[in-house]
Image: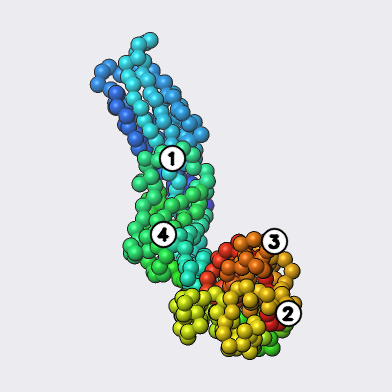
Amino acid sequence: MRFKSTITKLLVLLSFALMITFAFVNVHAAEKDIAAASGEATTVTITLGDEGKIVPQFDGDITEMRYDYYLDNDGVLSIDDQGNYKTLKPGTVFISITGYQGYEAAYNSNVTINVFPDMTNATLETDTVTVYKIPTYIAKNKPYYDALATTMIKLSGDAFINLDDLYGIDDYNANDILKYTSSNKSLKLSVTYEGDKIYILQEAAKAGKAEITVTLYGKEFKINYESVKAGISDQSYLLVKGKSHQIKVTGYKGDVVWKSSKPSVASVDENGKVKGLKTGNCIITAKCGDFYLGCAVSVTSSKLKKVTERATYIGTHWKYSQPKRAVSGYYDCSSLVWRAYHEKAGLTFGTPYYPGNTTTESAWCKKNGKVLSGAMSNKKITGMKLNPGDIMFKSYKKKTKYKTTYHVEMFTGYICTSVNDNGKANYTALWAARGLYYSTYQGYIVARPLK
């Protein structure tokens, strides 16, 4: 009796274990029959793992009816001649069904089946996103931020099917596939997906926070989104040789890696403190995660720094007037250069009490050996060959350049407008009166009045 009792218990346990195993194996499979009425088109959405039967609906005599099933995509599901189907992978399949009584077609129906992935165990790799907006260009000496910003979140999960396997999901079902809402309309956020990735696009340049609710294939995800403007305290700086200056990153909270493009000109420590070592120019970059910020540094003398700062002040604060060019508060191109050098460096350009013109100033530079070789060119700018205080004369004719000058402009340093994702800086020249992006056309004479 004891032996029989033990056997009985073992059989009960084995039966229970088999039930559990069967239930586990079929946890994602569902029996789902699909009714297909004659003369009608039916569209249904099922989940990968579902199986069932397409059941024709016919008003007439269905005895001995034979059906043909035509699939335009047999990779999504399989179907036998009895209408029993099994899902194979996510996608869309169109099935045309024809029923025959003898040789006569008595039944026709179309069924479109969308097979969506099983999102039961799908999760986000992160539900918190911080997007950093960085300066992309400069206008009126101020940084501007591009409105567009895109970030990506990957999906993962033990039983999650890679969405790269999706095939032929119809565009008109997009609303069933992806839905989203944002708690902050002013950020102009939109959500798309591709493969196993969710993309968030921001179309507003402003910073802010939002909670985004994304529903993908029926699975809801909550994403905490934040847009932050990151910047740098200086994009251009004149540094006196032997002196130091602290550059700071704003907005970004992570680790920053600092680097100098020419450590022999200016060094930078791990905290962004820059020291001027010798006359020249370089770019100081700050690597912040996967983006960069930059500052153009020109190492110069104390006297030349005062000259260029005075020239910039006159060019941005005083009024242009040739008749009043010698009156305080007014300037033209040649009086600006003369006044800055005369007041801050004691240089007179040959006229000690009254500003000359472009002809007398260029002649003085030539006579005193202050003219640099070669004309003004973009190569001089991109090669960082200019020093603060250098002046450019424009002339109508290259062959008679000293006799046909019509304009003079002072170079006041470089400015880093942006840094590419690979760490390469974009920079340009700054001019005392003309600011950014001033044309070098007809700049036939380049002079360095003071070293």
Q: Secondary structure at mark 1?
A: loop
Q: Residue at x 49, y 75 (%)?
A: 322
Q: Amino acid at mark 2?
A: Asn
The foreground one among 55 and 334 is: 334
Residue under numbered circle 1: 169
Q: Secondary structure at mark 3?
A: loop
Numbered tag placed on residue 422 in the rendering: none
Residue under numbered circle 4: 203
Q: Alpha-carbon distance for marks 1 and 4?
A: 27 Å
Q: Alpha-carbon distance for marks 2 and 3?
A: 20 Å
Residue under numbered circle 3: 399
Q: Quadrant of residue 186?
A: bottom left
Q: Nearer the viewer, mark 4 or mark 3?
A: 3
Q: From where the camera sits, is residue 259 visible? A: no
Q: Nearer the viewer, mark 2 or mark 1?
A: 2
Residue under numbered circle 2: 368
Q: Looking at the picture, how far across and down is residue 416, in whole percent?
A: 58, 70
Q: Alpha-carbon distance for marks 4 and 2?
A: 56 Å
